[in-house]
Image (tube, rainbow, N blue to C red):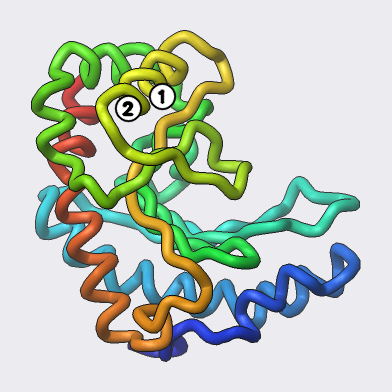
């Protein structure tokens, strides 16, 4: 571990800073190194579990010219050049949450076939996901959807049928959750979360 020693209130306050350049400066100096450090710690375990080399990508927010970002993240994927078209793991923050996602976002060129694979093997997918995990259908929104079979089917169907449809599954933690202040406990939780979701990750790669 390097720069990550747990999250604190100042990390979440970054998203209250007015102005694009002002927020980005603190985001890059305060949050990006922490998230990169977490991802670099988790990547070797994922590489060992998958048998693939895993690469860390820290969100750059490069396309922004006016509005400051409301969240930020680091991603882990099996490609050095990018992650958005691939199944990937995310660690990140909103102003009131920390999230751990296995993410399939709309850039994925084969998202219809991935969704079909999940829907065709729906029972096995539901067995993989613990009851306390949550879902999302849009990585750009600070929301989570309660995990149950009905909601999972709806999210997966939307992921398949809607051009901008996405499928994210994992954990979200409130900013005041004591777990976030304990770096070792958080790393262990993140490691366990991603390992739990590996069967879904592998199914996506095979589809």
Give the quarter of the image for residue 71: bottom right
Of residues 155 and 86, the one drawn nearer to the viewer in this rendering: 155
- Residue 64 relative to residue 105: left or right: right
Which numbered disc covers residue 95? none
Image height of 129 relative to 132, above or below: above
In contact (CB < 8 Å): disc 1 and disc 2 = yes
Image height of 125 relative to 134, above or below: above
As helix, strand or loop, the secondary structure at mark 1 comes to helix
The spot of residue 117 in percent (x, y) is 21, 16
The spot of residue 75 in percent (x, y) is 43, 55
Quarter of the image where the N terminus is located: bottom left
Give the quarter of the image for residue 120: top left
Give the quarter of the image for residue 29: bottom right
Residue at (23, 21) in percent of width and height: 118
Of residues 164 and 13, the one drawn nearer to the viewer in this rendering: 13
Which residue is denoted by mark 2 in the rendering?
152
Which numbered disc covers residue 155? 1
Residue at (90, 52) in percent of width and height: 66
Q: CA distance from mark 1 to mark 2?
A: 5 Å
- Residue 64 relative to residue 129: left or right: right
Residue at (46, 16) in percent of width and height: 158
The spot of residue 144 in percent (x, y) is 48, 44
């Amino acid at each position: 571990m390097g720069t990550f020693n747990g999250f604190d209130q100042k990390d979440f306050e970054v998203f209250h800073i007015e102005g694009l350049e002002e927020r980005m400066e603190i985001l890059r100096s305060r949050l990006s190194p922490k998230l990169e450090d977490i991802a670099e710690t988790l990547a070797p375990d994922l590489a060992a579990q998958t048998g693939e080399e895993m690469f860390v990508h820290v969100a750059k927010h490069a396309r922004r010219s006016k509005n400051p970002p409301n969240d930020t993240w680091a991603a882990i994927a099996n490609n050095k050049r990018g992650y958005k078209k691939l199944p990937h793991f995310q660690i990140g923050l909103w102003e009131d949450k920390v999230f751990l996602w296995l993410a399939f976002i709309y850039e994925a060129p084969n998202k219809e076939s991935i969704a079909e694979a999940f829907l065709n093997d729906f029972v096995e997918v539901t067995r993989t996901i613990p009851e306390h995990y949550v879902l999302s259908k849009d990585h750009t929104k600070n929301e989570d959807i309660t995990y149950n079979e009905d909601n999972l089917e709806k999210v997966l169907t939307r992921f398949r049928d809607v051009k901008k449809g996405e499928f994210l599954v994992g954990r979200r933690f409130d900013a005041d959750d004591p777990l976030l202040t304990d770096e070792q406990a958080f790393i262990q939780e993140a490691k366990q979360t991603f390992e739990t979701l590996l069967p879904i990750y592998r199914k996506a790669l095979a589809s």
